[in-house]
Image (cartoon, rainbow, N blue to C red):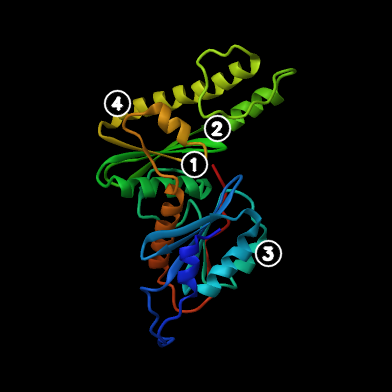
Amino acid sequence: MLPEDLKSSFNKGGKDRSLFEPDTARMVDLIIDVGNTRCKVAVFKQNRLVAHEIVDDRVQASVEQICQREQVRAIGLGSVGYLEDAVVVGLGRFSRLVLLSGGSPSPLRSEYTTMGSLGVDRLANAIAAHKLFPGRATLAVDIGTCITYDLTDGGGTYRGGAISPGPELRAKVMHTHSASLPLVGIPDRAPLIGTSTQESLAAGVFHGTVGELSGIIAAHRQQEGDLGVVLTGGGALPYVRALKSGIFADPFLTLRGLHALLLTQLDANSLADGRNSIGGHRPGHE
């Protein structure tokens, strides 16, 4: 749910203003991030993240509640998961709706050859990481259902990346593709050597992921030199601790990048005053 102090600020009144002269300082942007397992809504005011919540199947009700209390300039929707068309149409009734995809106008140049199928979360992560480390090469690492690695050079060109199974997916695959291996939960830490089958599986998932992360990050550092590394995603925190040095963590990296994409698209399209304008297309994921 939204923090109480933000709820209070939503309910405060304000001075009357002309409909033709919107007070942009008081307006907010909403970002909806539909992932493979979670749906999040975030509120940005003057380029600053001021509130966020996990809404899952309550996205339409949550957005309606915020729009009743805030002056919403635009809603940016980025999805790599599934959202019913009726929900998308419903969101467009609350404010100007902009659909964000890997092919949306971006502040980054790109060497990627299939932008139309690039997951918008990957592009958003690359944009936000580059903003955190301007002038430096950056590697954004998102640990979720899959682990994604996305590299941007110091000049602001998105170079591409890599995708591998996330920790939970690794555990599920070993369980479903074997006759007798149990399904294990994903630990925050695990012994290097397991003394039971469950411990051994947990050790393999955890230390296998740490080894992959360490190896790929080291290879990029050797190639790029001065490299800023940012980890994000629901499963990131244990691996930030395990990797220790030189790793920055930002749980809101994707939301910040989606907002940057929204601002870029609003500027590129020079959207006129009005409501219910939908730009972009329903994104896929690569």
The label nearer to you, 4 versus 1, is 1
Dot 1 or dot 3, earlier in sequence? 3
Q: CA distance from mark 2 to mark 1?
A: 10 Å
User: Would residue 154 appear left or right of 86 to someone viewing this image?
Assistant: left
User: Would residue 4 appear left or right of 222 to someone viewing this image?
Assistant: right
The residue indicated by pointer 3 is 86
The residue depicted at 61 percent of the width and 45 percent of the height is 37
Q: Which mark is residue 233?
A: 1
The residue indicated by pointer 2 is 166
The residue indicated by pointer 4 is 222
The answer to whether any part of residue 216 appears in the image is no
The label nearer to you, 3 versus 2, is 2
Q: CA distance from mark 4 to mark 2?
A: 24 Å
In this orientation, which residue lies closer to the viewer: 245 or 81?
245
Q: Are marks 2 and 1 in contact (CB under 8 Å)?
A: yes
Amino acid type of the residue tagged 4 in the rendering: Gln
Please say if 263 is above or below 144: below
The label nearer to you, 4 versus 2, is 2
**Residue 259 pos. (x, y %):** 43, 58
Dot 3 or dot 2, earlier in sequence? 3
